[in-house]
Amino acid sequence: MPIEFEVPKPLTQAQFMLKTVADEMIRPKSRYFDEHEHEIPWDYIEFMHMAMKSMGGSSLAPRENGNGKEGDGKAKRPPLGYQLIATQIESLAYGDLGFYHCLPGGGLGAAAVYAAGTPEQKAKFLARFQEDKPTFAAMCITEPGAGSDNSAIRTRAVLDEKNNEWIINGEKIFVTGGDKSFNEYEKLGRGFIVVWATLDPTAGRAGMRAFVVESGTLGVKITKLEHKLGIRCSDTAAISLVDARVPFENILGSPTIEKTTTGFKGVMATFDATRPLVAASGLGVARAALEFLKEKLNENGVQIRYGLPRQKLTSIERDVIDMEIMLKSAWLMVIKATWMADNKKPNALEASMSKVKAGDVTTKITQKVVEILGPLGYSREFLAEKWFRDAKITDIYEGTGQINRLVVARQILGYSGSELR
Amino acid sequence: MYSFDPTEEQQMLMDAVNKFAVNDLRAAAHEAEESRELPKRLINRGWELGLLQASVPEFYGGFGERSAVTGVLALEEMAFGDLAGTLAVLTPSLFATPILLAGSEEQKQEYLPKVIAGEWTPYTAALIEYAFNFDPNDLKTTAALKDNGYVLNGEKAFVPFAKDAEKILVYANLNGQTQGFIVTKEAAGLTVNDEREKLMSLNALPMYRVKLDSVKVPIVNRLGGASGHDFEPLLASMRIATASAAVGVANAAFEYSKNYAKEREVFGVKVAQKQAIAFMLAEMRTEIEAIRLLTWEAAWKLDQGHVDTYTESYLACTGAVDMAMMVTDRAVQILGGHGYIREHPVEMWMRNGRGFATFTGLAII
């Protein structure tokens, strides 16, 4: 297909529907949940679960057969899976980034199963997201001593051959949605967490594997819910695992250590798929802030005169125009990266570039908007200051801006991790 | 649907243009910039790629159809070789493309076959004016209706090949609207400066100041005929062209500095192995990609006749100006002292880079 920028219908439909959800359901509660950290927006969770079920989707990972309906006889069109998910995420984050994280479904946990699981594992662990109760899953990688450098993971998995179980010990932090994925709530289905651990600390990345740990597993405990700068209605958990026993078949990837780093690459494959999605979530916040600014400017009679040379523009006009350039171009990078994923083109470079760009753009735009709005921006009467706080996380999680720069740099220079540390 | 793959035909064209850009334009760029001479054979070879010819329908002597998307793909590739050479090769488009897009049927039949038949011939256009607040939508050069014709007054700057041009498409302010007027070389009151413009870069491209002192233009020579034309799509095409040329030059600077950084040893490693340098390169590549996509989208919208085209082309061009400055500046920085020496092309690209804020009007797709 030639170069084309026609927004596919399913994407515009999703934008239209989720705009209503954002305006009617999310925004009116946005401030409340910012001020009542760790309260759970049940109405929204239940509504979204029903809505998603009726639309036939409920996890971050696109379904295997793409968007084509079976037997509709039409020529096979390229799938829109990741492009559609990016669009949905952007639209929800436009409502509220914390609420987006409260979207029931598999999240990163399911994405890991999708990327690194066997067909049996996918069938077993992914089906639950389609059931009656909203269900969550989370990814546990970060540890107190291992953040961006996730090869430093110390959580240990040892095989108990007699019982054919893994015994996992370690401590995980910064688990997004860990509470809703692991703790048992009456209103929620049984979730799971995907725990990254090493089979052999001396084996480095080659020894790294992920394990599906079901909600309620003995020896696993949520020890803390963090208090954060923003995205306060998204829970961020610390989890301890003490002699936690997990069935043998819950390992994602091979149970034996080869001299390769395929296990580790499983994590990375997850990130190639999800980085543009995290980028999309940031851009939703940025768009919210920019639209709010334009609305306020408009109310005050300030028009943006597109087409004038810069020498004739006011400072505010220049800022708004520059922000629009950033936002539009960053969104196109997200679309390209997800389009590549949908078309099975390797997109490690594009995925990381979209995250680098979106992290920059989202923080810059929300910061600028608060600056330009002055007291209106800084006041908690409006949401601009909240978006400023929410936005910062998008340049940090799923690989900080710096880690993504490193990934991009290695790609463009053709360097390995040891050549460019 | 979104798609980011050029067609097979476009890819073949891009490969051909890239070959010319690297083997011919780039190879000659330094010497041309220093001597202020661009070898005629280079211009001819570029012309033989047939970019303009392929955008003109058969009926007017061409062999294709205009596509802004194909235009940006080709222009980026060519500008990757050398900007001055690219602008020289494409100068006849400055005259022909507006006629193709906005000319009257008579004008198309009269001029298009002439411009594209045979060898490269200097037809050109004059938009830019010598003023700090130059605004293509608010020109100081005026046109007034008088005695069944138009009278043009004012001064134009940076007019490529004005000295040799058969015809110049002069843009002037007619009752507050920018309109094009086809002016012949012999018109009374038209003076082309003897001396070429001396600019910070583009030394190889002969550009001139052009004075218009009560130059009379017949009604039929108003672009689009008596009722004139809409200037927005032309300005959009020019801005998209500026943006894609900026992407090409930025990409040249990025590739060159990247390759240099992979060769250059410091403290026992390659300088590219230092995060300070590697991160600069990562950001350069990211910004190039961002603006390239924005430019492609604007070009696609132009082809579709989309309502947003004018604004999008403005955003792409404005973004490209900053991107090109940032990337070319960093390329010089990455080469350090060597970047400052004219033997390496990065300093020239940095001079090009600053120019994109001013170059709209020197290319059109």
Image (cartoon, coloured by chain):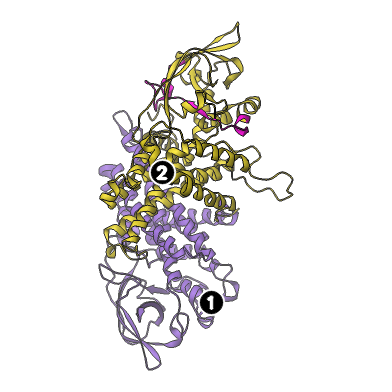
Chain colours: A yellow, B purple
Q: Which residue bears the numbered disc 2?
A: A358
* Subunit ID for the residue under disc 1: B
Residue appearing at x 39%, y 82% in the figure: B183
Residue A365: % across, % down: 35, 48
Q: Is residue A23 left or right of residue B61?
A: left
Judge by depth and name the residue closer to the eye, A149 or A157.
A157
Q: Which residue bears the numbered disc 1?
A: B113
| Residue B200 visible to an observer of this rendering | yes
Residue appearing at x 49%, y 35% in the figure: A42
Range drawn in magenta: A127-155
**How many numbered marks are there?**
2
* Subunit ID for the residue under disc 2: A
Residue A251: % across, % down: 57, 19
Q: Is residue B206 left or right of residue A346?
A: left
Judge by depth and name the residue closer to the eye, B45 or A313.
A313
| Disc 1: CA contacts within 10 A as few (<14), some (14-19) or many (>=20) | some
Tag 2 secondary structure: helix
Whether tag 2 and tag 1 are in contact, CB under 8 A, the answer is: no
The outermost residue toward the top is A162
